[in-house]
Image (cartoon, helix red, strand yellow):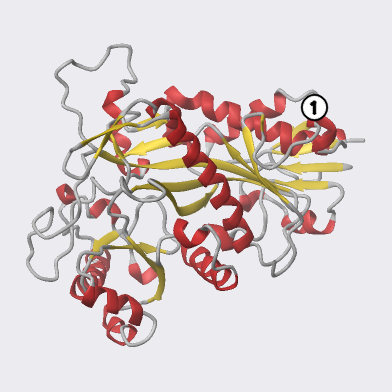
C-alpha cells in the first residue's frame, strides 16, 4: 500500500523543516512530496499550510486521507467568531470556567468612524454604560481578522474610541497618498491597520492586574546578570501550543513560553503615555503589548520558558515585592489552562469535527494576579492562532518546537500510517495525564450543538 505525505509551507521554512524532521523520526516511512499533482496513492497525509490542502479529498476520502487542518477553525481563530461562540456557550452553561477565564467582550462591525454614534444606542449600549460609569476600567480594541498586533488600541472613554477610528481613517488616506504621517517613535505606526479593508472588531476588557515578573532575573546568556541590576515588573503572556486530533482529543504541550513586553508595566491612564488632552488614548503600547512580532529587534531577550520563571520575584503595581513565583503556582496555572482549553473547544465546535484531521494551534493566555483574591491567579484566554508564527521563538528554544512537532507526529500521524489506535500505542491515556509532553485536556465525541 503506497502512502504519500504532502508537505508544503511556502512562507514558513522553519515549520517546513520541523515537519520533515518529525516525519523522518517515525518508524514507518512515507514518500514525501511538495505537490499532489498526478501522484497515485492508497493513503495520503496532508501536513501542509491550509491553502495547500485538498479539502475535498479530506472530506470525501475520510478513511484514506489525513489532513493537518480542520474546516471549523474560523470559530476558533477569528476573534469575533470566538467571542460569539463563547457568549453563546455561556448562555447555555453559565457555570463554565469560561465565565471567569474569558474577558468581557463586545463585537463591533464598523466601516467608518461616523457609524459609531448609532452603535452606542445598540450593539455597544452596555459598553457605553461601563465607559460612562466606570472610568477606572480600560478596554482594548482588536481587529477581528488581523494579527501581529495590528490595529490594537487602548481606551477608556467614548471620545477616545471615536478618535481612534478617525485616526484609522486618516491613516488610510495618508497611505493612499503615499505619505507616512504617524510618528514612528510612538509605536502607533507599527500597529497601524487599514480600516477600509476591515470591518469586524472586538472590544475586550483590558486586564489591569497582570502577573508581573522580570525576565532579566533569568539570564539567557552564559554571563549572569549584574549584581546591581534593578528588577522591575514586566507584563507577559503565555504562548501555549495545543494539538487537536480526530473528533476529538485535545492536548496541551507542557513546554509553555512566556513572552514579555519590552518595557516595565504601568497601568494605562491620563498622563502615563498620552498627552493629547480629553479623548486621547495611550500611543505608546510597548508596556502593554507582548507580541513578539512587534519586538523582533529584541531577538530572544523577551522569551522565556514558563518553567524558568519558578523562583522569580513577583511585583505589585507599585513595584512591591510580593514574594516568589512558586512551582505550585505554575502547576495551578497549567491546570487552569487545560480546563479553559477544553471548554473553549466545546464552545467553538457547534458542528462535529472531521475524524481524519488534526491541527496545531498557538494559544495566548494572560495570567491575572489578584494577591488577595480567590484564586490568586486567574488564567484568561486571549486568542487562538492557527499556523502560529513559531519562527519568532528564537534559536535558543528551537528545541522546544522540535520536540513539539515530534510529539504531534507520534500521536496524530503515526497511528494513521501504522493503522493503530493511540490507545494501542500508549495504553490508557486519561484526561489530565501527560505522555510525549502532551497533557490530554479533552477526550470525547463532540456532537453538533453540544
Whole-percent x and y of residue 397?
Answer: 46, 25
- The quadrant of the image that shows the N terminus is top right
> In the picture shown, does residue 261 fall above or below 152?
above
As drawn, is 177 to the left or to the right of 386? Answer: left
**Which residue is found at the position 63% from the left and 59% from the top?**
346
**Which residue is found at the position 65% from the left and 62% from the top?**
349
- The quadrant of the image that shows the C terminus is bottom right
**Which residue is found at the position 31% from the left and 48% from the top?**
372
Whole-percent x and y of residue 157?
Answer: 20, 71
Q: Which quadrant holds residue 92?
A: bottom right
Q: Is residue 81 in view?
A: yes
Q: Is residue 200 in view?
A: no
- What is the tally of numbered marks visible in this picture? 1
> In the picture shown, does residue 231 fall above or below 354?
above
As drawn, is 84 to the left or to the right of 212? Answer: right
**Which residue is found at the position 32% from the left and 75% from the top?**
127
Q: Which quadrant holds residue 241?
A: top right
Whole-percent x and y of residue 344?
Answer: 57, 57
Whole-percent x and y of residue 414?
Answer: 78, 33
Amino acid at each position: 500500500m503506497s502512502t504519500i505525505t504532502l508537505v508544503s509551507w511556502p512562507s514558513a521554512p522553519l515549520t517546513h523543516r520541523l515537519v520533515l524532521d518529525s516525519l523522518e523520526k517515525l518508524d514507518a516511512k512515507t514518500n514525501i512530496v511538495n505537490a499532489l499533482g498526478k501522484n497515485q496513492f492508497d493513503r495520503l497525509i496532508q501536513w501542509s499550510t491550509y491553502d495547500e490542502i485538498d479539502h475535498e479529498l479530506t472530506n470525501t476520502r475520510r478513511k484514506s486521507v489525513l489532513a493537518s487542518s480542520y474546516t471549523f477553525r474560523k470559530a476558533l481563530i477569528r476573534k469575533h467568531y470566538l467571542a460569539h461562540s463563547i457568549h453563546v456557550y455561556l448562555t447555555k452553561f453559565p457555570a463554565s470556567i469560561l465565565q471567569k477565564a474569558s474577558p468581557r467582550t463586545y463585537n463591533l462591525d464598523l466601516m467608518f468612524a461616523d457609524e459609531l454614534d448609532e452603535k452606542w444606542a445598540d450593539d455597544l449600549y452596555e459598553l457605553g454604560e461601563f465607559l460612562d460609569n466606570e472610568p477606572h476600567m480600560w478596554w482594548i480594541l482588536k481587529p477581528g481578522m488581523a494579527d501581529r498586533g495590528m490595529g490594537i488600541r487602548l481606551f477608556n472613554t467614548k471620545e477616545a474610541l471615536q478618535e481612534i477610528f478617525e485616526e484609522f481613517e486618516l491613516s488610510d488616506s495618508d497611505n493612499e497618498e503615499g505619505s507616512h504621517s504617524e510618528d514612528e517613535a510612538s509605536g502607533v505606526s507599527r500597529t497601524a491597520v487599514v480600516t477600509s479593508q476591515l470591518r469586524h472588531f472586538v472590544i475586550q476588557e483590558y486586564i489591569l492586574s497582570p502577573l508581573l515578573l522580570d525576565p532579566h532575573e533569568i539570564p539567557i546568556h552564559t554571563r549572569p546578570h549584574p549584581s546591581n541590576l534593578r528588577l522591575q515588573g514586566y507584563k507577559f503572556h503565555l504562548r501555549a501550543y495545543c494539538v487537536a486530533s480526530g473528533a476529538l482529543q485535545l492536548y496541551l504541550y507542557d513546554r509553555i513560553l512566556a513572552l514579555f513586553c519590552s518595557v516595565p508595566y504601568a497601568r494605562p491612564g491620563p498622563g502615563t503615555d498620552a498627552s493629547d488632552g480629553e479623548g486621547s488614548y495611550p500611543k505608546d503600547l510597548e508596556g502593554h503589548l507582548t507580541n513578539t512580532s512587534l519586538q523582533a529587534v529584541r531577538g530572544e531577550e523577551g522569551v522565556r520558558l514558563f518553567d524558568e520563571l519558578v523562583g522569580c520575584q513577583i511585583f505589585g503595581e507599585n513595584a512591591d515585592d510580593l514574594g516568589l513565583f512558586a512551582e505550585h503556582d505554575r502547576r495551578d496555572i497549567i491546570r487552569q489552562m487545560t480546563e479553559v482549553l477544553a471548554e473553549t473547544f466545546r464552545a467553538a465546535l457547534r458542528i462535529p469535527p472531521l475524524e481524519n484531521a488534526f491541527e496545531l494551534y498557538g494559544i495566548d493566555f494572560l495570567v491575572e494576579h489578584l494577591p488577595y483574591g480567590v484564586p490568586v491567579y486567574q488564567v484568561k484566554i486571549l486568542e487562538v492562532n492557527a499556523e502560529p508564527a513559531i519562527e519568532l521563538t528564537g534559536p535558543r528554544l528551537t528545541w522546544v518546537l522540535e520536540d513539539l512537532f515530534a510529539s504531534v507526529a507520534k500521536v496524530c500521524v503515526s497511528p494513521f500510517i501504522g493503522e493503530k489506535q493511540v490507545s494501542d500505542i500508549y495504553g490508557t491515556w486519561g484526561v489530565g495525564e501527560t505522555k510525549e509532553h502532551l497533557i490530554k485536556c479533552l477526550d470525547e465525541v463532540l456532537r453538533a450543538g453540544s
